[in-house]
Amino acid sequence: QVQLVESGGGLVQAGGSLRLSCAVSGTFSINAIGWSRQAPGKQRELVADINSGGSTSYADSVKGRFTISRDNAKNMAYLQMSSLKPEDTAVYYCNVWARPNFVEPVKDYWGQGTQDTVSS
């Protein structure tokens, strides 16, 4: 059973930093990993992703401030967020495109989310 558990969210002042972690278990292999966020009343948006080769991409709104990384040996993913703004306030979700076993194809799995609040 594939499980993702996010941690590291919380309350921070504008200009501060937070580091989110995502622990992944139960996968046979992991292709890409993504971090998305959903603010109240808004649609969920993908803010960063990293593929199996380590190539990354970012939403324009976070480029230069957020850094996504992964530790394949530990099945962990991270999102380092700096220069935070009040508009970064949202629930942040980790997801993986992964195979649960050697038989089934790649599927998309999501964590439960972690709340990040940036005060002005």
Image (cartoon, helix red, strand yellow):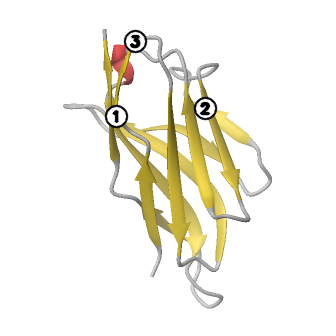
Q: Amino acid at mark 3?
A: Ala
Q: Residue at x 34, y 34 (%)?
A: 10
Where is residue 33 shown, x and y percent of the image?
A: 59, 54
Residue carrying label 3: 14
Q: Residue at x 59, y 80 (%)?
A: 105
Q: Left or right of 46: which side holds 54?
A: right
Residue carrying label 2: 58
Element type where label 2 sits in the image? strand
State yes or no: discs 2 and 3 in contact (Cβ < 8 Å): no
Q: N-terminal of the two: label 2 or label 3?
A: 3
* Disc 3/disc 1 C-alpha distance (Å): 13 Å
Q: Residues within 10 Å of mark 1 (few under 14, many from 20)?
A: some
Q: Residues within 10 Å of mark 2 (few under 14, many from 20)?
A: some
Q: Left or right of 2: which side holds 113?
A: left
Q: Nearer the viewer, mark 1 or mark 2?
A: 1
Determine which quarter of the picture holds residue 74. Answer: bottom right
Q: Amino acid at mark 1?
A: Gly
Q: Residues within 10 Å of mark 3 (few under 14, many from 20)?
A: some
Q: Nearer the viewer, mark 2 or mark 3?
A: 3
Which quadrant: the N terminus?
Answer: bottom left
Q: Left or right of 42: which side holds 71?
A: right
* Disc 2/disc 3 C-alpha distance (Å): 20 Å
Identify whether 16 is placed above or below 70.
Answer: above
Identify whether 111 is placed above or below 83.
Answer: below
Identify whether 53 is placed above or below 28.
Answer: above
Residue carrying label 1: 10
Q: Residue at x 60, y 86 (%)?
A: 101
Where is residue 82 shown, x and y percent of the image?
A: 55, 21
